[in-house]
Structures are given as structure tokens and as C-alpha cells.
Image (cartoon, rainbow, N blue to C red):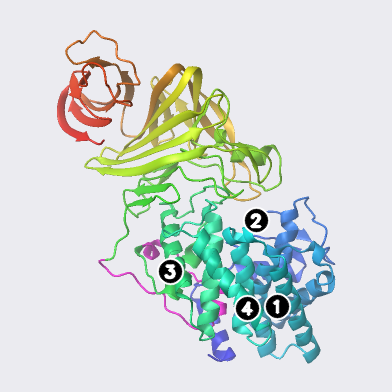
Amino acid sequence: MTETSWTTYIQQLSQQRHLTDDARKNADRLLKNEFLFDSPYAMEPTQVSYTMDPITWQQTPNGDPEWLYMLKRQEYLLDLLEAYYETGRSDYQVKMKALLFDWLDENLAVPDTWRTIDTGIRLLNWTGVVANLLEDQQLTHEEQARIEEAVNVQATYLQQNYTEKFDISNWGVLITTGILVYAARFPEVLPRAIVQWAQQKFETELDLQVDAQGMQWEQSPLYLLEVWRSTLAVIAAQQRAGMPVAPIVLIKARAMQQMITQYVKPDLLLLQQGDTDAIRIDSLYHASAALLQQPSPLQQRLAPVVDFALLELRHQEWQVPKADAEQSLSEVFAATTSGNYFWRSGWDAKADYWHVFNGNLGSGHGHAALGHVDLTIGGHDVLVDPGRYTYVDGTERRQLKSVAAHNTVMLDQRPFSLPNDSWKYRYVATPVQHSLIDFGGGQVVKLTFLDQAQTQPALVTRLLISLSQERLWLVVDMIHQPGRHSLKRFWQVAPQLTVTQQDHGYQLGEVANFATTDTQMWTSQQLFSPRYNELEHLTRVESETTFTDFTVQAAVFASQQQPLTLTPIAAQHSGDRQALVPQRLAAGFRIDLGEGRNILVTLQPENTIVGRKLYWFDGTEAYGSLNIFERQVQQVKQHFQVF
């Protein structure tokens, strides 16, 4: 495709509103030396703009070093390039060139101010920009030689400063993709040995850090997104160059698209897990479908916009494939390797949805969130993860990474995992086991983790029970810990919901009702951050119970139209109804739904080895670790023996 026809194609996309107006807005700011990092996929976006004329490359205007890192990545050059294509105005191209050379003038000679991740990203961002300047004959031979020298210096820096830990870090992927993308577009600029090294490292990185189901080990959808987008950039650049794309690269990219699909909530925002923002990924999703020729029914709900950065690297008109009429997405997804479980009632805007986590911590982007659950009812968020807000170490950073900021549990006021600073932990808990069981009435995720923060390690077992037909979600916690203890449970309620106390629990806006068996309940205010550098508040419901040796506590969420109460049910021995049964042997809960309808849940946490093994619960006999009965008063209408 000639540059004239390519420009025409970009202008057509803009006129058809397949490109957002973000680039033009930012390009106009840049003409005035005004910097605001608000692109859709910015890793550390900002909400306050700063005018710098001249640019002070080594001094952050807001005290956050991440601001300088964003400045030096130069992603904004692509906004100027897109604006130039769309309008034909040369001032955008002139500014694009000036900013590139300003970086060269002020930074190339001071590599001690660089970081490897930013250098890799910068090479990727330079690729399309340098290509345009060359094709439009806007570079002298001396300027071209200067850029090529700078690219070689940066690529050499990346190779020399690469350490083995980058093999399992998004940093490694962002380092090597910068080299590979630039080398694909300009094959004569970089030494063959460096390019071969980057390709081998890139394949190793994807093999080690992206599992077969597509989850990136750092347990953050945002950084999964960065690795996915960088991988797509390599595919786009190598496809344009007519190069063969390594099979493992295509396999992992397809898996990442499938995985990120699960993190798209009914409102089309990305689920906030670990260091992640609530953003939409429409343009990236469409780009992935086009580059991989992997359509998905989710595309039908997304805005028909294009990721310009990837389109520019591919430099060819593409058609986003449409999903077949019979193609469907699974409503249940067990990402067992990473400890992430997903369920939804459908893929529409009004769907019910939950996500449960019990995996390894991952990197410093991971949060203290074992046992955490996110819940959406009727398309409205109910239980949420409050986000990340900042990477600057301090009260807010540590609080948002803490156990108390997640929908999980704490024993004896001592968190099972404790952040030490912005990136490290003093100690962490260990996930032991997790599994998903599908049964006729819904799904159960059973998870166990070892809380080693206690004097004696405590075994925490959590059951997340989705009674999808009834639109009930039950959370059951079982704690084995010798001695006298307290159990606290935390519930971060979505900020748009007003929390109102009722006789038996709380009403959560017009969306849900909530009840629990804990002896004490109260509300508090908690930080909430929908995006980096944005800070709001939500209402947190907290509950607490004291116990000796063992406890089992339940909580239930229901759609707002469901009236409900939650009542603990004491078990009775068969043949001896008066004998006291310890909770660790048998316990039950009844959820009353009105008009005599109720759900009876029975548990036998430990094997009964002395005496009778059959128990009665509220007039219903049961045997097994988990039974669920749908009843009319005490008459069983349906019985699910789950395990």
C-alpha cells in the first residue's frame, strides 16, 4: 500500500469513527508543549496536564517518578502521527520530529537516567514515526544516521542490562518487543546477533510467563494486557515484513485473547485485579481478532474502533473477522493454573457475573487477595476490588494492596499477607488447593489457603456457591485454628451503591440484598481507585465473629427483588437428636426466600469417625461434605449432593 493510499485509508477510518478522537486531542495539546498521559492503554495515566517549554526531561512536575517514565516512552509521538494522517497538517509531523530529537539531545548521553522497560517501549513507539519521516523525506542523511546510532545504543543497552528475572516479567516482553518491532521494519539497522537474541528471549518469556490458558503470571489483567498488546505488535510488524511468526508467539497470543475475554465485565470494563484500572479494551480486542484471525462473539458488543498503534505497524487495511452465528463463549471458565475462576449468566449488558481468586501472588503488581470474590448482579457491580491508585509507596498504596481492601478474611487482626512497601511483601500466604464443581443448580468454587501469619498456621477454606437459577451467591468460610480467635470478613461494595442497614443485613442500592451469620457487622469508608491517579471512596461492610478451634460462617447475596434471611442451623445426630454436634463435624444454613421457600445448605467439614455419620438439619437428613436442598418449608423439592 502506497503512503498516499495509506493516508487515505486512515482518513476514511477517522471519518467512519473507527478511530477515537483521543489522538487529535492529545496532538493539539502537544503542539503547546502540554503533556497529559491519558491514552486508553497508558500503564500509569495522569489526570493533570503540565506545560513544559522547554521540557525538563529529568525532573518530574508532580513528584511521581512514573510521570517521567511515561514522558520518556514517547507514546504520544503516535498521536501526532495519527493526527498528521487524519488532517495532512505538517505542524503535527514537525512536532513529532522535534520531540523525537529533543529526547536524543537531552537523554541519549545520560543512560543512567534510563530504564530498560521504557527504552523497549520507546523503540516500539519510534518505529512507525521514523518510517513516516523517512517515507516523507523529512530526514537528512545526518539525521537518519543519528537515529540509527541511537537505536543501536538503546538496543545494546537493553541486551547488556537484561537480567534473568525479566524472563518472567512484563518488563522482559516490553524490552524484547521494542527490538523485534524496530528490526522487522528496518532490518538493516540492528546487528543480526541482537535481533536473534531478542527473538529467543521473547519466545522464552512467553513460554515461562503466560500459561496455557493465557494468564500472565503477575496476576494483573492490566499487565496481561500489556504483554498481549506487545505480542500483537511483534506479530503485526513481522507480518508486514513478510516474516514467519514463531508458532509459540501465535499460540500464546490466541490464549491471551481468550483469557482477557473473561476479565471483560458485563459493563465492558476490565475487572480490577492486582494493579489494574477499570478501562475498556475495544480497539485492542478488535486488533487482536484481525491480526490472529480469531473472531469472538464479544466483538458484537464492542465499539467498532481500531488500535492505531497496531494498525500502523501492520500497515495494511484489515478486516476484523466476524464470529460465526453458531459460535459461542463459555459462561464458565476455570483458569486453574493461575487460580482464577469465572462465571456469568450470559454475555449481555445485564448479566450476572463473578470472579474468584486463589492463586499465587505473582509479582509486586499482585495484591493480598487470596479468597477474593468480585460480584456483578444484573450488570451492576456489587463487590469490587478497589484498584491501585498509585505506585508511590505510602499509606494509600499499601492500603489498596492489603487484605482489608479485598473481599476476603482476616484472623486475629493479622493479615495473611502483608505489603512491605510499594512492591515487596513482608510475608505472604500460600494457596493450597482450588477447584470448580458444576452441579445442576449452579457452581461451587472450593478454595483453600494456608495463613502462615499466625502463631500456628491456620487452614482457611472458602466455598463460593453460585445458585445461578435462584440468583443467590453464598460465601462460606471454614477456619481450622486451635485456641480462641477472631474472624473478620471484608466486603468492598461498589461505590455507586448506597448501603442501607436492614433487620437481617444490608440493602445494597437497588441491586442486591446481603445477609451474614457473623455476630457483629458495621460499615466503614474505604479508598477506591478506578484508574491510576484517580481516588474515590466506597462503603466497606465488615463483620466479625470470635470462635474456639473452628468456625464456619456464611454470607449470602441476592438480587434486590429477592427477600431473604440467613439462619445458622445446628446439626443433630441421627438416632440421638439431643446430642450436641460440633460445627467442625456438621453445620448448616437456611436461606429463607419468602412464602415458605428456602435453600438449605449442609456441611460436614471433617469426617465423622465416632458414632453415627448421618445428620439431620432442620428436619432434613443429609450425608456428605456439601449438600444443597431446595425446599418448601421442610419438604425437599430438589437435592444436590455436591461433594
**Would residue 633 be visible to someone looking at this image?**
no
357 left or right of 113 in image? left
Task: Kindly report the distance in space between the C-alpha atoms of the residues bearing marks 1 and 2.
Answer: 25 Å
277 left or right of 28 in image? left
Q: Secondary structure at mark 1?
A: helix
Query: The disc labelled 3 sits on which kind of residue?
Result: Ile
Q: Which residue has dot 4 on it?
A: 195
Q: Position of residue 124 (x, y in %)?
A: 64, 73
Task: Kindly report the distance in space between the C-alpha atoms of the residues bearing marks 1 and 3.
Answer: 38 Å
Q: Secondary structure at mark 4?
A: helix
Q: Nearer the viewer, residue 535 or 67?
A: 67
The label on residue 410 is none
Q: Which residues are magenta?
A: 298-326
Characterize the magenta stretch by its predominant secondary structure.
Answer: loop
- Discs 3/2, front: 3
Q: Which residue has dot 1 on it?
A: 92
Q: Position of residue 164 (x, y in %)?
A: 63, 61
Compared with residue 502, is residue 199 higher up or lower down, i.e. above or below?
below
Sequence-wise, the earlier of marks 1 and 2 is 2
Q: Nearer the viewer, residue 158 or 320?
A: 158
Compared with residue 101, is residue 221 higher up or lower down, i.e. above or below?
above
User: Was residue 324 drawn as part of the magenta stretch in this picture?
Assistant: yes
Q: Which residue has dot 3 on it?
A: 251
The label on residue 44 is 2
Sequence-wise, the earlier of marks 4 and 1 is 1
Q: Secondary structure at mark 2?
A: loop
Q: Residue at x 56, y 78 (%)?
A: 313
Query: The disc labelled 1 sits on which kind of residue?
Result: Tyr
Sequence-wise, the earlier of marks 3 and 4 is 4
